[in-house]
Amino acid sequence: MAAYLNRATSMVGGDGSQNRLGLFTNGTRTISTVNDSPLQVFVRAKKKINDIFVEIHDYSKDAILFLQEIEDKSIIQDAEVKEVDSFVGKVKAIRDVLCRDHMKVAFFGRTSNGKSTVINAMLHEKILPSGIGHTTNCFLQVEGSDNNEAYLMTENSSDKHNVQSVGQLAHALCDSRLQECELVHIFWPREKCGLLRDDVVFVDSPGVDVTPNLDEWIDNHCLDADVFVLVANAESTLMVTEKNFFHKVSSKLSKPNIFILNNRWDASASEPEFLDQVRSQHATRCADFLVKELKVCTTKEAEERIFFISAKEALLARLREKDQKPASSGALAEGFQTRYFEFQDFEKKFQECISQSAVRTKFDQHSQKGRLIATDIRTVLESVHDRATTLRNGKLQEKEQLHEALNRTEQQLMIITREMKEKIRFMVDDVEQRVSRALNEEIRRLSNLVDDFNLAFHSDPIVINLYKKELHSHVENGLGSNLKARLSTALALNIESVQLDMTDKLTDLLSEEKIATSGNTIATRRQPFQVSYRLNCENLCADFEEDLQFQFSWGLSAMIQRFQGKNYNRFAIKSYGSNQMVPRPMNSPADSMDLTTVSYNGVSNQIGPLSAEQWTVISKIALATFTSQSTMGGLLLAGFMLKTVGWRIIAVTGVLYGGLYAYERLTWTSKAKEKLFKKQYVQHATRKLRLIVDLTSANCSHQVQQELSTTFAQLCHLVDEDSCDMDAKLHELDKSIQVLEKAAASAKKLKNTANYLNNELDIFNEIFLKSAN
Ligand code: GDP
């Protein structure tokens, strides 16, 4: 025992590492307290375990708060939250039990053996009533009161009965008709008794000889007792009733701590010659009872559990000491000092025993429960930590992949954009060339188209205007449909192939979700595109003026016109050549619509050849000049010819000339007029259409360019949207990674707290429990 005390003292003393338990602030005081009373071990153990449980309570509350506040619920399970939540209540219940934990000693024996007297002697005060006869008719539990008041409370009532003295107590107990099994709590000021101050609780019982309900007694009052004291009468021997009771106790409790007090040993003073003999006989019987019958201790241990005392003398001595009188004063039987020393020895052994037993039986359980709770919470937090870490790693990987995909998309988009620009440029050039070639071909075949026009012709100006209008639209439609027939299929195929190519390439950059959601947009892009060939002949040939005046083909003006025609053609070709570089249309479709008109007007203003009217005027002037100024010359020429070829030839030529004129005049019908009209129209339209070949082809290529650019832009927009989605996803991932990292860090911290608590419990076990075992 001394070794145990020394060990306990060294553990809880001035050493800094032990002070972190928070129990002991003053090493010197601790040592002296430990030396004063073994009960202090229990007191300190209780405080320490209480402190640890306060921490476990806080820990369980922190853990549940943490679990409830976790943002990402996928890393916790409802069952785990419930489990940890239940721990808060459990720890609270243990703390409540801990507060009530005390060292309990129960006194049993036959009536009037002196149980109450022993308790009074131990408490240094006459608290319990004692006397000859059946003085204790129920269970009395004496414990310290926190408010320094003396009162008693019965089991089924919370009423406090004031008691200031033993007389009052006895009176109060008599007044209340109590069953023998009932328990009355007697609260006595702690300050008055050292044992009460140190949390020892005394239970006095009615005599075991007065009741058959021993089982009930044990169940109700003995199961949590740390030490049992059998108060026997040394004037007789151990009785069967006493033995029976303890047989029952040891059958219900494993190795109960039992002390046997052979009381009334003062009686032996009257027969000193038999003293040793009787003592030896009692001691042997008591030891046999403990060792052989009950088997609760060894023979050596039994020697430490059997005492021969006089409680009456011890109580008297204590009361004298209290009055500051010598303990041995007054009339005392022979051998008082020896008996008093033995009583004190009993007290010392009892204190060591009850302290160790209570620490072991009560706090060992709490310590184990605390460890289990801390470990279980730790397991939950470990799972949360592991899940958070695994999820975080997964998300980090996802983030990295997303990052790579985003970069790859960006690079691919740049490459595809460059490639598609090239393709579109090539496509535009190709379309321009094709349209230009086809239109030139159609212009060359314009006369066929005009010949196919079958509307009735009349030279009346109103009819001619209508005829012109219809002819314009016939030519416009004919040219349009011919161009379409020549180009549409090839162009559509080429455009579609480029569109498909860009769709496929850009679709490859899209995520599956995006493809699923943008299916319509992508499909729309695959619809065939038609180039519109708008020539607007009405505007183009608005300035066409037919000349249906009869004209003798061998007349002077016709001759001049023929000459003019040659020059005109040469001039027109020259002009046409100089106007090859027709500017490209602007990007706006509205601009492209009006281009024919604008350019036509522009061109008509630029072209320099003289009109037919101008040439007629010139020829008339030339003729007049010739007539007026050269009359004389003409007469001379006629005379010269008459003389050279003869009049007959002149006459025949004149007749032929006249006949030719008459023939032409007679065949100048409506049909001839229509033919001339169409011929003039073809010439005019050919000239005008040639001027807009470049413009038209540029317009068509522009349409294609617009179509392909729009397709590409729309697909790029989808890729952009997808990239934005990926960006948003990256942001989301960043956020959830942060949440998970925070959760993992908190779980780790709380996990470590469990380690700290387990460590605290380890230290507690090392200091208090190992030494108590
Ligand atoms: P209980 O019924 O077992 O509680 O016994 P009590 O404590 O009431 O004591 C019964 C009587 O025995 C009282 O009158 C006591 O004074 C007396 N008594 C108790 N202990 C001793 C003792 O050691 N020696 C003597 N001579 N009388 C005692």
Image (cartoon, grey):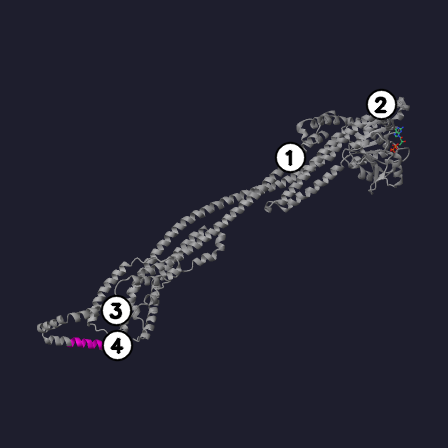
Q: Which mark is residue 613?
A: 3
Q: CA distance from mark 2 to mark 1?
A: 51 Å
- Whether tag 3 and tag 4 are in contact, CB under 8 A, the answer is no
Secondary structure found at label 3: helix
* Disc 4 residue type (three-letter): Thr
Query: Mark 1 — residue?
Result: 756
- For the residues carrying marks 2 and 1, which lies nearer the camera in this image? 1
Q: Nearer the viewer, residue 50 or 384?
A: 50
Numbered-mark total: 4
Q: CA distance from mark 1 to mark 3?
A: 117 Å
Q: Quadrant of residue 574?
A: bottom left
The image quadrant where one finds the N terminus is top right
Q: Determine whether, in the image, residue 60 is placed left or right of residue 40.
A: left
Amino acid type of the residue tagged 2 in the rendering? Thr
Circle 4 or circle 1, nearest the eye? 4
| Residue topped by disc 4 | 669
Q: Nearer the viewer, mark 3 or mark 4?
A: 3
Viewer-nearest residue: 503 or 721 = 721
